[in-house]
Amino acid sequence: MSDLPTNDQIKIGSKVAIETKEDQGTGKLTEGIVKAKLTSSKTHPHGIKVELEDGQVGRVKQLLDIGNKTKISKSETFEDGI
């Protein structure tokens, strides 16, 4: 089972970390806000493809919580007060 965020978890306006095609295999991630989801399936083995507000396109590797800057990835869930 994949540790990548599913299409249902990614929302327009979400802050995410993506891997662009140019950066594949380098480990470099680019942060941005989701403008559009380009993958229609629930999951993808390399991550859901999105377009960021700045026009960059890539596959989501992590969801980033805007409020407290806590990374949410894999099967981890963070809640306030815990």
Image: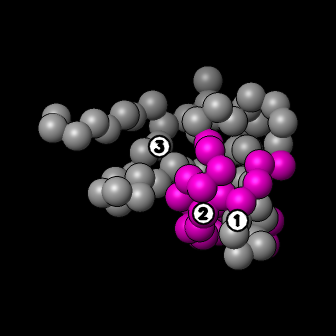
Mark 3 or 1, which is nearer the eye?
A: 1
Distance from label 3 to label 2 (Cα)?
16 Å
Q: Is residue 35 magenta?
A: yes
Q: Is residue 14 toward the left or the right of residue 44 in the image?
A: left
Q: Is residue 4 depicted above or below 20 in this figure?
A: above
Q: Which residues are magenta?
A: 10-38
- Is the residue under label 2 in contact with that under label 1 (CB below 8 Å)? yes
Quarter the C terminus occupies: top left
Q: Is residue 20 magenta?
A: yes
Nearer to us in this view, 49 or 15: 15
Mark 3 or 2, which is nearer the eye?
A: 2
Colouring rule applied to residues: one colour
Is residue 53 shown to the viewer in this render?
Answer: yes
Distance from label 1 to label 2 (Cα)?
5 Å
* Residue 61: image location, x then y, percent: 60, 51
**Which numbered circle lies on residue 33?**
2
Q: Is residue 60 depicted above or below 55 in this figure?
A: above
For residue 11, which quarter of the picture? Answer: top right
Nearer to us in this view, 45 or 38: 38
Question: Which residue in the structure is indicated by mark 1?
Answer: 52
* Residue in the image at 73% along x and 44% along y: 48
